[in-house]
Image (cartoon, rainbow, N blue to C red):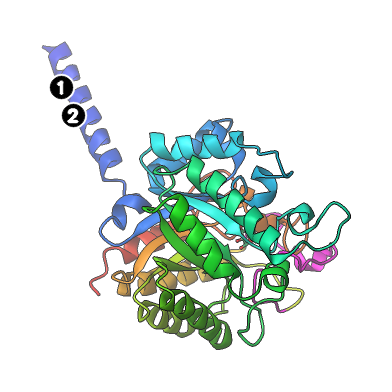
């Protein structure tokens, strides 16, 4: 009898524990009806070397982006040499976990080797040669993951930071303004079913917003399919304002495309340049006055971060009919690129999970926005 009672008590305990675990809300479940929620993954996370973080990823996210493995430099370092293994592992991880798997990125002015633009003696190649190289690269990479990668950032950061004109890059100077048209055409040919995106930072700025609208309208006028505009979302605690972000969501969706937030993080550290963008070439010398929270984030800043994330997700939910996904640029604070940009070796706090993989107060605040009736 005693034993029976103990057994019943234990079973009830296990049962309620099960219920607690089941009802623990996760990002992917909380926003299931609204949009995908995801993160950019590095190789250690994909390979399973870091089992704890993999469990977190599977639990919280239903879309993934590759932090580096599908960029031109890492995957196609030399003319006849491709390094597919890291990208293969990334795509396999997405497939095994039934995640909406993103390809990032096909045509960009960064992390692209010089040989792409040069002949054997280092002179710029002709438009025809560069177009051939672009087509071959896209056919090979997109073709390899056809039907497995669901959407591609075809062109990244083609609009200049000031003025909204095309950014002066080798793609532009050698091929001309239609390099983006060609990139989208080649990507569509390589996988007609994949979604295709234009991706950029600081798209809350009116001039950049208008530049992207012009670019996308130009593509659409040629009959090219653009499924979404990716707003990277490398934000600060106060810049941009919620109204600025909202204005771009509304303006972009009028083009008949979805809006994705593709690289969301919030930098809480003091800023040496009052920078507003995410130009990876813009870096600064180490200086401890810009690395002020090495022993932990003060409560007051934690609260600002929490409120900032809550405000952003309240906005995202308000426009959930226009938004396809929200992807964080990293999983935990430990592996954010913001520990090394724009200054190397800082202790940064931009994400929803801390260095011990524990949820920060911002996670709860974000989850609560899912229940708002707006
Ligand atoms: C840009 C790129 C990303 C990444 C970040 C910083 O936003 O699109 O791939 O390189 O910079 O890491």
Q: Nearer the viewer, residue 347 or 258?
A: 258
Q: Quadrant of the N terminus?
A: top left
Image: 67 above or below 81: below
Name which quarter of the figure residue 57 lies in.
top left
- Residue 366 placement (x, y as % from top left): 39, 62
* Magenta-drawn segment: 274-297
Q: Nearer the viewer, residue 147 or 326?
A: 147
Residue 262 visible in the shown view: no
Distance in Å between CA atoms under marks 1 and 2: 6 Å
- Residue 88 placement (x, y as % from top left): 53, 36
Ligand 1 quadrant in view: bottom right
Residue at the spot x=41%, y=83% of the render? Answer: 251
The residue that mark 1 highlights is 8
Badge 2, how many Cα within 10 Å: few under 14, some, many 20+? few
- Residue 97 placement (x, y as % from top left): 38, 37
Residue at the spot x=35%, y=81% of the render? Answer: 254
**SS class of the residue under badge 2?**
helix
The residue that mark 2 highlights is 12
Asked whether the beta carbons under mark 1 and mark 2 sit within 8 Å of each other, the answer is: yes
């Amino acid at each position: 009898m005693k034993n029976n009672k103990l057994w019943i008590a234990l079973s009830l305990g296990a049962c309620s524990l099960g219920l607690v675990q089941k009802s623990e809300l996760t990002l992917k479940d909380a926003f299931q009806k609204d949009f995908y929620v995801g993160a950019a993954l590095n190789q250690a996370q994909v390979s399973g070397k870091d089992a704890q973080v993999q469990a977190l990823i599977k639990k919280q996210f239903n879309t993934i982006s590759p932090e580096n493995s599908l960029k031109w430099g890492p995957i196609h370092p030399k003319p006849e040499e491709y390094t597919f293994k890291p990208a293969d592992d990334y795509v396999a991880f997405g497939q095994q976990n039934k995640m909406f798997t993103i390809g990032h990125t096909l045509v960009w002015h960064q992390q692209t080797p010089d040989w792409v633009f040069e002949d054997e003696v280092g002179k710029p190649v002709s438009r025809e040669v560069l177009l051939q190289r672009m087509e071959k690269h896209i056919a090979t990479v997109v073709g390899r993951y056809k039907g497995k990668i669901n959407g591609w950032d075809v062109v990244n950061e083609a609009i200049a930071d000031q003025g909204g004109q095309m950014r002066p890059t080798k793609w532009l100077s050698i091929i001309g303004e239609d390099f983006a048209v060609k990139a989208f055409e080649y990507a569509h040919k390589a996988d007609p079913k994949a979604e295709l995106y234009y991706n950029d930072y600081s798209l809350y700025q009116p001039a950049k917003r208008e530049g992207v609208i012009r670019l996308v309208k130009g593509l659409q006028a040629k009959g090219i399919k653009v499924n979404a505009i990716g707003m990277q979302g490398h934000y600060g605690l106060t810049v941009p304002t919620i109204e600025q972000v909202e204005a771009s969501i509304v303006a972009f969706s009028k083009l008949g495309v979805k809006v994705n937030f593709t690289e969301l993080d919030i930098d809480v550290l003091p800023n040496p340049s009052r920078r507003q963008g995410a130009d990876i070439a813009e870096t600064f010398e180490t200086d401890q006055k810009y690395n002020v929270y090495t022993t932990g984030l003060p409560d007051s800043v934690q609260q600002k971060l929490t409120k900032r994330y809550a405000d952003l997700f309240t906005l995202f939910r308000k426009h959930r009919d226009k938004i396809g996904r929200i992807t964080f640029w990293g999983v935990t604070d430990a592996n954010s690129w913001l520990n090394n940009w724009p200054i190397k070796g800082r202790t940064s706090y931009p994400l929803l999970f801390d260095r011990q993989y524990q949820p920060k107060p911002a996670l709860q605040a974000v989850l609560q926005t899912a229940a708002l009736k707006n």
